[in-house]
Image (tube, rainbow, N blue to C red):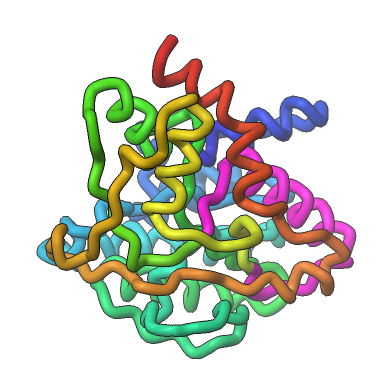
Amino acid sequence: MLGKDVLARLTADGVRGVGLTRGDLDITDPEAVHEAVAEHRPDVVVNCGAWTAVDDAETHEADALRINGDGARNLAAACAKTGARLLHVSTDYVFAGDGTTPYAEDAPTAPRSAYGRTKLAGEQAVLTLADTGYVVRTAWLYGAGGGNFVRTMIKLESVKDTLDVVDDQRGQPTWTVDLADRLVRLGRSALAGTAPAGIYHGTSGGETTWYGLSREIFRLLGADPERVRPTTSAAYVRPAPRPAYSVLGHGRWAAAGIEPIRDWRDALHEAFPTLLAAERP
């Protein structure tokens, strides 16, 4: 989903991008990664590959670590050989999720799930590239190119009279098109030497809950938002704990001369026609 939007953004700018799927490249194979980077000689590598099955990671942590941790380490080693900048996409799950104010980029990490631990391992591998390693944490992604919460709500609105949605988890719904734009701009700034390496937070401005997001989706569909009813996380017990507070701060973008992503409502309103067309063609 995100990878497709990164390639689309590059194409719109007239920049040649090479997208490699899981079938094209196994990032857990260090030799294959080195060969791919040596063959294509990229200036910037954007790692959108990840084990994202949060609950499955609880019982398959070693498998998730091979992709989220070792895969990132393999890319970091290959980029170090060629001098390519590495932009690694990470997650809010590296934090404990019990905060009350937005997590700064340098806030202490304390993952509470296997998924978060494996993603943190990937971050640490990338950050060993002192001058060329970039970590961009994101959360609550949605887009037209894959399954996600927003598209699910669009689908359910037409088949459910009412929906019970969690109202005790706060975060920042983020359109993959907006994140792709920031990744491309960050890559350019990295090459120009105007963006310091390190950690950035690529999420929308503002904050809401899954319940608040669902009500906004219903409004955009012309449906009655009162059909969405609030509930708690206790009603949906999952193997992996969900962060109660996933709001990220965006202070570091100023150092790169790039403005943070806009408010989540503005993005959702612009994205909605494309999302609706994808879900209800």
* Left or right for 69, reference 78: left
Residue plotted at (19% across, 58% down): 55
Residue plotted at (53% across, 38% down): 3
x and y percentages locating residue 109 in the rendered image:
44, 85
Most extreme residue toward the top is 281
x and y percentages locating residue 161 in the rendered image:
23, 29
Front-lying residue, 45 or 256: 256
Let me know if residue 272 appears in the view.
yes
* Left or right for 155, reference 232: right
Residue plotted at (55% across, 50% down): 174
As for residue 179 lying within the magenta part, the answer is yes
Residue plotted at (69% across, 59% down): 85
As for residue 3 lying within the magenta part, the answer is no
Front-lying residue, 243 or 11: 243
Whether 95 is drawn above or below 240: the answer is below
Q: Quadrant of the C terminus?
A: top left
Please state the total of marks drawn on the protein image.
Answer: 0
Whether 115 is drawn above or below 26: the answer is below
Instruction: Find the magenta span and give its range.
Output: 172-200
x and y percentages locating residue 153 in the rendered image:
35, 35
